[in-house]
Image: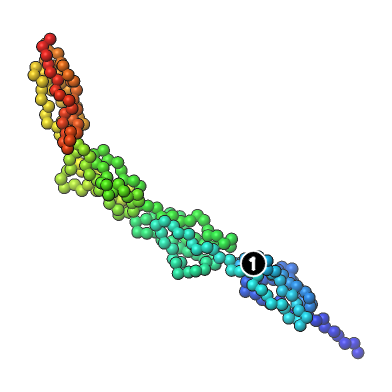
Amino acid sequence: MAILLLAAGCGTPTPLLFAELSKEDKNQTEFPVGMTVNYTCRPGYVEQPQMSPTITCLENQTWSEAQEFCKLLQCPPPPNIDKAKHNSQHLDVFPAGIVVNYSCDPGYSLLGEESIICTDSGNWSLPLPQCAGGCGAPPNLSFAELTKESKTKLEFAVGDTVRYSCRPGHLRRPGMPQTLTCLQNHTWSEALEFCKRKQCKYPESPKNGRVVVLTDLLFGSSVNHTCDEGYRMVGQSHRRCEVLGRDVAWTGLPPICQSK
């Protein structure tokens, strides 16, 4: 009577959380002693350098111990974004597939997607979101300039207010605030003319001549002087209302009209 001898070997290779059998070894049905099978890392895991991704069927018909030749793929801590915070400050590990959400500080708006994801390459998805500042530099006004405190500010969130002071030659209009505010649409509120031009005194007319007011007597305006017929002008005919100390006055001296 013939005796059927079964070949010594191992059963199905050990299932691993971090790796799966290679395509070639998945099709194997018999695993004799001495046979080695190969694994590939599962998604979200990466090979450990200098560690062989294999196990071997031993003489005792058991599989050799599977070393942890695939480690969990993870990203570095999420990048910090200016004027923003993310929702994963409590985490120490960031495996592939984890999603991190950002939110901007009050007064700033999110540009781009609010979330990033740790990819299978161990890097965070791009592009990173950004938080846009409320407004750009405050407008330059002909009649007023920023106060020292407001000049030192570099960023302006929605809701921020800057203050102006009247330039030389100008006077504050009563009851009008000297401020601008950064609005929700990231533009500055309308700059009302809260400083008015100071006015020079009516210029004296030269003897035997007269003054010609070209526009008005306000700061920056000009007047001309003319002499009566039979007289000639000595000095400048043109004068301008300019800053003098803390007030305004006409430049130079009035001309003289001399008899020809």
Where is mark 1, residue-wise? 48
Q: Residue at x 57, y 62 (%)?
A: 122
Find residue 38 and report its horizontal and vertical position in percent. Answer: 72, 70
How would you rate the neighbour count of disc 1 (Cα within 10 Å): few for under 14, some for 14-19, many for 20 or more? some
Residue nearest the observer in this picture, 197 or 167: 167
Amino acid of disc 1: Gln
- State which quarter of the image contains the C terminus: top left
- The extreme left residue here reads 207
* Secondary element type, mark 1: loop
Task: Judge left or right: residue 88 versus residue 202.
Answer: right
**Residue 212 makes an appearance in the image:** no
Q: Measured along the vertical axis of the image, is residue 234 above or below residue 190?
A: above
The quadrant where residue 217 appears: top left
- The extreme bottom residue here reads 1
**Residue 221 makes an appearance in the image:** yes
Residue nearest the observer in this picture, 101 or 45: 45
Q: Residue at x 75, y 77 (%)?
A: 57
Q: Residue at x 12, y 27 (%)?
A: 203
Residue nearest the observer in this picture, 242 or 173: 242
Task: Judge left or right: residue 75 versus residue 64.
Answer: left
- The extreme right residue here reads 1
Q: Which residue is drawn at 18% across and 43% down?
A: 172
- The extreme front residue here reads 245
Q: Measured along the vertical axis of the image, is residue 179 above or below residue 1?
A: above
The quadrant where residue 55 appears: bottom right
Find residue 167 and report its horizontal and vertical position in percent. Answer: 22, 39
Find residue 52 and report its horizontal and vertical position in percent. Answer: 70, 69
